[in-house]
Amino acid sequence: MSYKGNIAGPPEATPSCGRFEHLVSDPEPGHLKTPSVNEGVHIAVEPASAAGGWHLLQGSLRRQGGDYDARLYFTGEGRLPSGYAAVPTSAKGVVNDLVWLPAGIRGLRLEVGDAAVHELGPMRIRPVGSLERRWRMLQRVLPVLWQQPAAKRLRLGLTWSRFLSDLDAAYALATRLRAHAAAPTYQDWIRRFDTLGEEDVRAIRQQVAGWAGAPLFHVLLAGPDGPARKRSVASLQSQLHQRHALTLLEADDAAVLRDFNAALASAQGEQWVLLLRAGDELPAHALFWFAREAARHPDARVLYADEDELDARQQRCNPRFKPDWSWAHARSTRFLGAAVVLRAQALASAGGLGPDDARYGCYDAVLRVLDAVRQAPEPQVPHIPSVLLHRAAAHAQGVDDWAMAAVAAHLARRGMAATVEPVRPGCWRVRHPLPSQPPLVSIIVPTRDALALTRLCIDSVRRHTRYPRYEILLVDNQSTDADALAWMRSQDEAGAIRLLRYDAPFNYAAINNMAVQQAAGELVCLLNNDTEVMQPGWLEEMVSHALQAGVDVVGAKLLYPNGLVQHAGDLVGVGGLANHAHAFLPSDAPGYCDRAVVAQEYSAVTAACLLTWRSRYLALGGLDAAHLPVAFNDVDYCLRVREAGGRVVWTPHAVLVHHESVSRGKDLSRQQLRRARREAAWMRRRWRHVLGRDPFYNPNLSHERPDFSLSHAPVVDQPWTS
């Protein structure tokens, strides 16, 4: 697999992209006038700049969600050059980048991609001399060389030798790791990270030659004869691991399926099944990688990998970089896709393949195989984070009805009295009924003054919650506002809440720990006082997930007041220590691979609305009040739950509004900043082994920001290099 740096060549012609409404003149040359949101800017260039050379662009560009591709276009007259320079920013929106401009340009224009929200602050561009340029480049490159893992730098193409021989190129590579640098296109990503080189092929052949008892893959290829099927067969013939048996299936040929299933029933040793349809293609290393993963997981019955599609021109597109296995996710959508192999003996024991499997795919077969091997703990479903299948872009009619029926049958086999209903094409919702006597839930709401917010929160819970058994514990942390204190007393006396006092300096973790100790419920719901319940079924939905086997924590979907997503699960180590997935997405948008609209497991969820079992909370010591009094205590708790073997589920079907500011955060005092740094440092020490690889993200996606964009330096262990 080729891992080489992508050094930009000559400037590209200016494409027509980005969202721009109009241009504005700048009254002061060398400065960018601050525009309104999604407005373009144009600046005149002083003669010194027109001479060309290296320039320093400085300013502020805050972006949240959407496309982070910002570009500074330069234009000339006649035969003079035109092109652009990328404008990356830090996570805080700081622009501080060196750009090279050709001589003779007549104007500059800054364009911002289609971000959900962006604010452009004052910006200035000026020429820099050779010494300043080198000094600034060293400041950018050296921290990357010293701090980033060697494997990541290798994927990026940034080596010490390149740094010593070509500082300009090293600077361009290091800049790609800025938090808000433009993501690579998929074609560029393929060229850099998903193309086998001669050394890769040679290494794979050497490993295959040394294998004893290598797996045999039974490949069932469904579809009529023609160019599409020929391409599929050709991809099988090009496999570097050639132990496979091909069966061709046209239409619903019962005899072929019967013979195929008979072969599975008599399978001995390591044998696996791969179901393809005409037009699907396998990269040359696909069966090799599946075979290696099978050897690493001898108890696995199902393996799956990432995949993409082939367009009408047979160009790869629409990659699906998947998370690791999650039962909640698998019951909500066919997220495993078609890049799946099943152990032959296990599939035979589960009834083999039928006409619907050949027509619609392996989804039902996966569920049947996993249901047939019920054990504790349940069998692993390993995930290979590499594109091992290129799918023919097609959609079988009726596939969703078939898939929902498959989920319903799976639930029935497991004795789960649940129903399945559609959400959107390709997605569905499993509704788990509550028992006749549902568990008592203690809703814990810490507050200090903030009467308007707290009243809105409590009133919304009482007015909109349909769940029959809950209590509200309002925890007052040294309120001084007379009106707030009077309202709290009145609510307590009326029996609407149970008022607790925490008479000590603010410590979010300690406040909740004290309240949980006094809670009467089997379940506790940590709820911020700036949230607002909007749907009557929110708590029913969360409790129904908590009642499923192994689930210890459940999180909700939180929206900003403007309807954009604030929280849809937490990604750990991505974009920092922890960040919300799908932030600033429209509330009903599907998100990456539909992940914003289906229930699934995540590494963590926010305590702004977090449901957990009181017994588990107490057993784990609650939130860490000693090391994490304010920040990251919810993430830490969720990670400890997972460390202890529990599951953390996020559901989009419990929706609340979180009245947290969409714009920049509050200014912090020096004391608060020191506390924040201490908490962050402790998290890095405690969870160092987790921060580099969130199982519910994908290592091929950007680790610099949590937006599911492609990575400039994917860290994926390739089996032929180990």
Image: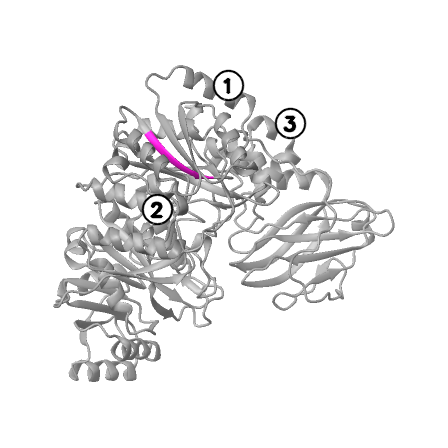
Which residue sits at x=71%, y=52%? 15
Asked whether 274 falls inside the magenta stretch, the response is yes
Q: Which residue is mark 2?
A: 363
Rendering quarter of residue 665: bottom left
User: Disc number at residue 165?
Assistant: 3
Q: Which residue is mark 1?
A: 202
What x and y, as percent, mark residue 452? 34, 80
Residue range highlighted in magenta: 272-277
Asked whether 24 falls inside the magenta stretch, the response is no
Nearer-the-camera pick, 329 or 218: 218
Which residue sits at x=17%, y=40%? 375
Label 1 or label 2, whichever lies nearer to me, is: 2
What x and y, as percent, mark residue 608? 32, 64
Task: Say whether disc 3 or disc 2 marks the residue closer to the N-terminus.
Answer: 3
Q: Does the residue at mark 1 contact the one at mark 2 (Cβ under 8 Å)?
A: no
What x and y, as percent, mark residue 702? 49, 45
